[in-house]
Image (cartoon, rainbow, N blue to C red):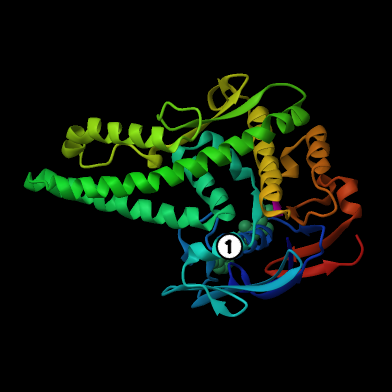
């Protein structure tokens, strides 16, 4: 997969810029607050339709402007496509080859990216919601049906919770209606569990070897926490367990007014030599764990889509020692497109620099440097 060009209009601190990327390594160099991360963010938004760093889309629009627009020329399996993202305070639109895609979820799996950022440590340190979001975005990039089902699930969950809450006040509940909602929720939940089991199993195929390769010790595994008490996806078994859980919880739910069980409670634990890395791991071990996780994803994306995803590295080299830098570079071969940001070219290993295109980012402008 390749991003040949991206054009930003009124995006963050850019009024209008257009960047032609090389097929391999692209380095964005500039001082702090000049707009390096904003470029990576624009690529992320073009792929995911949402930012990785702000909850409110409106922040993406340049101050005092009415809208922002991103256009990307991508190449997937040898075929070129034009992607477009448009955002105003009234609407968000996306299109492929000038044809609007009505459902954002149908758009997302067309263009795959893997982002490495210093904020990734939150995946370990943050709340379970951070890890569920990670699962949703990554699985969603591979399977847009998953995102449709997830949307359905979230809507049903909201309806069910609202219905339970109304019942607290009125104290009369139509059990047939509630059961019908529960049936539908369980049907959607099964698909979500299936995809999450599959994805976590796939990560586990790679993550331990990569972690060992980076650190030369330790055994890293991801454990999928879902309280289903099963080791693998088994539709009949899980369906039965879900009905049991919903039955057991009903009286409590009627009092609390929330749905107590389901994939909206899922979590992942990163286990290093059987210990939770969140509690026992050092900062360095946690960072290596994240690197191994993201590198595993590249392999999975390649395995499933038959193409490398585009890799975005936001200022990650400054935090790694030489050994880890070398290990990371090993995974980036010639047929993978990478966009790296840095404030200092010294952070970047020679092997990468020699093959790269370098762009100077300064106060919302970008200039390709012919010689460094
Ligand atoms: N909506 C917006 N409109 C105008 N400017 C914005 C908007 N959002 C962010 N900015 C500006 O963008 C700049 C930050 O850009 P960015 O995060 O890309 O910096 P950076 O080059 O990655 O810096 P660092 O090296 O510190 O990470 C800030 O100066 C910020 O004020
Ligand atoms: Mg930055």
* Figure check: 354 above or below 60: above
**Cβ at disc 1 under 8 Å from ligand 1:** no
On-image quarter of the C terminus = bottom right
The answer to whether residue 149 is seen in the rendering is yes
Residue 21 lies, in percent from the top left, at 78, 66
Specify the quadrant of the image occupied by residue 168: top left
Mainly helix, strand or loop, the magenta region? strand
Return the residue found at the far bottom.
Answer: 98
Looking at the image, how many numbered discs can be counted on the residues?
1
* Residue displayed at 54% across by 58% down: 51
In the displayed orientation, state which residue is furthest to the front. 236
Report the front residue among 359 and 32: 359
Secondary element at image label 1: helix
Q: Nearer the viewer, residue 26 or 268?
A: 268
* Image quadrant containing the N terminus: bottom right
In magenta segment, residue 174: no
Residue 130 visible from this viewpoint? no
Answer with left or right where residue 29 lies relative to residue 140: right
Q: Quadrant of residue 317?
A: top right
Span highlighted in magenta in the image: 309-313
In the image, ligand 1 is in what quadrant?
A: bottom right
- Estimate the x, y position of residue 280 in percent, counting from the top left: 57, 21
Q: In percent of the image, x 20 and y 42: which residue is there? A: 257
- Residue that badge 1 annotates: 45
Q: Residue at x 66, y 28 (%)?
A: 285
């Amino acid at each position: 997969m390749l991003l040949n060009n991206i054009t930003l209009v009124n995006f963050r601190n850019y009024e209008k810029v257009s960047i032609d990327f090389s097929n391999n390594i692209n380095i964005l160099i500039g001082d702090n607050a000049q707009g390096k991360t904003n470029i990576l963010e624009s690529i992320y938004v073009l792929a995911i339709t949402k930012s990785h760093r702000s909850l409110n889309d409106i922040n993406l629009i340049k101050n005092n402007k009415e809208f922002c627009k991103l256009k990307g020329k991508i190449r997937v399996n040898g075929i070129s496509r034009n992607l477009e993202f448009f955002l105003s305070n009234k609407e968000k639109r996306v299109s492929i080859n000038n044809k609007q895609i009505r459902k954002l979820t149908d758009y997302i799996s067309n263009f795959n990216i893997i982002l490495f950022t210093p904020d990734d440590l939150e995946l370990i340190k943050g709340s379970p919601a951070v890890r569920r979001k990670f699962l949703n975005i990554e699985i969603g990039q591979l399977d847009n049906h998953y995102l449709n089902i997830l949307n359905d699930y979230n809507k049903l969950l909201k309806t069910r919770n609202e219905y339970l809450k109304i019942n607290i006040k009125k104290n009369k509940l139509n059990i047939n209606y509630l059961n019908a909602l529960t049936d539908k929720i369980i049907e959607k939940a099964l698909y979500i569990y299936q995809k999450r089991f599959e994805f976590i199993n796939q990560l586990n195929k790679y993550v331990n070897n990569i972690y060992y390769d980076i650190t030369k010790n330790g055994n890293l595994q991801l454990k999928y926490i879902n309280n289903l008490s099963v080791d693998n996806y088994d539709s009949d078994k899980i369906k039965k367990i879900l009905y049991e859980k919903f039955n057991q919880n009903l009286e409590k739910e009627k009092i609390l007014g929330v749905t107590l069980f389901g994939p909206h409670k899922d979590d992942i634990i990163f286990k290093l030599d059987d210990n939770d890395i969140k509690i026992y791991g050092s900062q360095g071990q946690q960072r290596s764990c994240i690197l191994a996780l993201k590198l595993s994803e590249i392999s999975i994306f390649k395995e499933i889509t038959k193409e490398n995803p585009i890799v975005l590295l936001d200022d990650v080299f400054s935090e790694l020692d030489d050994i880890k830098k070398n290990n990371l570079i090993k995974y980036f071969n010639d047929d993978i497109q990478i966009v790296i940001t840095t404030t200092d070219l010294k952070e970047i290993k020679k092997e990468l620099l020699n093959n790269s295109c370098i762009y100077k980012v300064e106060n919302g402008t970008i200039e390709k440097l012919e010689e460094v």
